[in-house]
Image: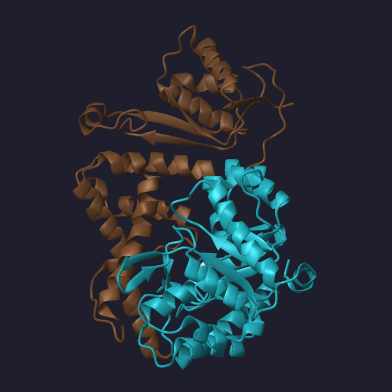
């Protein structure tokens, strides 16, 4: 199953399903909750046509302050209303001192943060009555780290029991920006816990810095890393993220096709039906 | 809480820096990479504000706009977990901090209120439409109006002017009714006289037009022979424009 992020820029074309036809769509509940009018009608049409996974933005699992219970209630009823089959979020924080920043900030790789985040993941999973799939985010600077990134991630998965969203592009970006080996990093993850994969393009803004823009096509080395990675995983849904600089839709369909052919090469169809989450 | 005070403080310092652009001295970061975060957070906030208030952004002096967004991002804790609702907090912040006086933009509150109402109406959750029949007695039947609306009162005609000079010349009492067209979801607005604004408000409260007309003298409205028929002509026109739905069955 290869899907694409549902965006207003090409919502109507997705619903028509002619120029672009993914196996599923993904969107952020925060962008579609409490909405009516034109966009609600389109959302309904999209949900009727495609299976939907949700990828949240404002949970802020790494925030120091308590979880926002009202927010959780609204997300839960949204997920229930649209029968969302998978809810993922980010290992990061986007809120501090109750101020939303609407962006993903890096959490210090520290054991106290591991415990804090793990217990919050459990609270969310209990409340939502569904597993959380947590994404390894791209980051541009470590913050007061006392442990390695991979140990930090592994420990959160172990303590919380969450699943992992493996964004292969994020790992590529992080490996480049922080000068480590992407394959070695992936090898050390609990790969049996990977429940979802993201793929995207990025932009190199300095000789030693890549920014995870989701504004370009996926580059070949990221496809290569993806192909290497999925041979080590059970079949899971794969999503193409494209948020900016949207190209002609056949070009996006071409990226979906390429991802799908790599999946088909390594994950047989019958295998995918058994192992996939949707 | 499992988080140590030290980790908490570091996270707090990092996020404060992103919002204010000040105090870059944060433990254990790569200083050259830090500014990317400030840029990204600030851009997300300012781009959402520019998109929500396109008229204000295009017409207010750039340095005033920049100062407002900087002030807002630095000092206001955004409460909305949905980015599209954040501009309401900007508008509220502007009113609470008397930015109209501080920046010498007397029409600022009217303009932000108008632009926010348009965005809010466009996005807001659907409201149930009451059952109605298309024909009835304009004077004596209850007239039903589109429930997705905002009736705003302005001192300055921000709905039709954008230049400072023209806005300041036309200080007065302006009324604008914005509403969402059910089928297309597009937001329309209609400028109302004080009398028609009063009529709309009363119709929304379920009062019949004949009862509303009785109040006209108390509002210092000159009751001409044609007041009733002019009002009905207006309401008929509004029925074709989907503000008036029809009549209570
Ligand atoms: Fe991602």
Instruction: State the residue in front, B32 or A129.
Output: B32
Residue drawn 46% across the image and 78% down it: A65
Name the spot of residue A21 as percent of width and height, x first.
66, 50
Position above or below: A238 against B217 = below
- Residue B44 in sight from this viewpoint: yes
Looking at the picture, does residue B238 appear above or below residue A154? above
Question: Is A24 drawn above or below residue B170 in the view shown?
Answer: below
Above/below status of B32 relative to B3: above
> Which residue is found at the position 52% from the left and 31% from the top?
B201
Depth check: A16 or B55 in front? Answer: A16
Q: Quadrant location of the N terminus of chain A?
A: bottom right
As drawn, is B99 to the left or to the right of B197?
left
Which chain does cyan denote in the image?
A
Chain B: colour as depicted: brown
How does the figure colour the protein chain or chains? by chain
Q: As drawn, is B23 to the left or to the right of B180? A: left
């Amino acid at each position: 199953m290869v899907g694409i992020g549902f965006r207003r820029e090409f919502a109507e074309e997705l619903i028509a399903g002619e120029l672009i036809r993914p196996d599923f769509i993904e969107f952020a509940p925060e962008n579609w909750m409490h909405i009516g009018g034109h966009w609600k009608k389109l959302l309904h049409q999209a949900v009727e046509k495609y299976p939907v996974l949700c990828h949240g933005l404002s949970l802020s699992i790494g925030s120091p302050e308590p979880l926002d219970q009202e927010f959780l209630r609204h997300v839960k009823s949204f997920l229930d209303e649209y029968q969302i089959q998978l809810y993922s979020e980010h290992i990061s924080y986007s809120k501090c001192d109750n101020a939303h920043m609407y962006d993903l900030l890096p959490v210090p790789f520290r054991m106290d943060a591991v415990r804090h985040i793990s217990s919050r993941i459990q609270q969310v999973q209990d409340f939502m009555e569904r597993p959380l799939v947590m994404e390894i985010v791209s980051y541009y600077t470590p913050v007061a780290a006392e442990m390695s990134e991979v140990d930090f991630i592994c420990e959160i998965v172990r303590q919380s029991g969450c699943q992992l969203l493996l964004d292969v592009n994020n790992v590529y970006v992080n490996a480049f920006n922080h000068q480590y080996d992407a394959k070695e990093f992936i090898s050390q993850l609990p790969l049996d816990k990977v429940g979802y994969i993201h793929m995207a393009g990025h932009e190199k803004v300095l000789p030693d810095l890549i920014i995870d823009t989701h504004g370009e096509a996926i580059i070949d080395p990221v496809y290569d890393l993806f192909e290497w990675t999925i041979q080590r995983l059970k079949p899971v849904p794969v999503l193409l993220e494209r948020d900016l600089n949207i190209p002609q839709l056949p070009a996006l369909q071409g990226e979906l096709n390429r991802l799908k052919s790599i999946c088909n090469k390594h994950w047989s169809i019958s295998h995918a039906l058994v192992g996939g989450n949707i | 809480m499992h988080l140590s005070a030290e980790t908490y403080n570091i996270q707090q310092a990092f996020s404060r820096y992103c919002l204010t652009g000040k105090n870059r001295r944060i433990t254990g970061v790569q200083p050259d990479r830090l500014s990317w975060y400030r840029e990204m957070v600030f851009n997300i906030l300012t781009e959402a504000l520019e998109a929500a208030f396109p008229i204000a952004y295009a017409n207010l002096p750039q340095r005033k706009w920049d100062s407002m967004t900087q002030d807002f991002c630095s000092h206001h804790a955004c409460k909305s977990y949905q980015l599209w609702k954040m501009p309401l907090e900007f508008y509220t912040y502007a009113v609470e901090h008397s930015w109209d006086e501080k920046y010498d933009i007397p029409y600022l509150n009217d303009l932000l209120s108008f632009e926010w109402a348009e965005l809010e109406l466009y996005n807001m959750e659907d409201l149930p439409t009451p059952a109605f029949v298309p024909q009835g007695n304009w004077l004596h039947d209850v007239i039903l109006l589109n429930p997705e609306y905002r009736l705003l009162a302005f001192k300055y005609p921000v709905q039709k002017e954008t230049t400072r000079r023209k806005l300041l010349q036309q200080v007065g009492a302006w009324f604008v009714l914005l509403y969402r067209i059910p089928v297309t979801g597009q937001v329309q607005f209609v400028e109302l006289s004080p009398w028609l604004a009063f009529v709309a408000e009363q119709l929304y409260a379920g009062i019949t037009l004949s009862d509303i007309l009785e109040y006209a003298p108390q509002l210092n409205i000159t009751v001409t022979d044609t007041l009733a028929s002019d009002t009905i002509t207006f309401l008929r026109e509004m029925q074709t424009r989907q503000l008036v739905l029809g009549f209570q069955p």
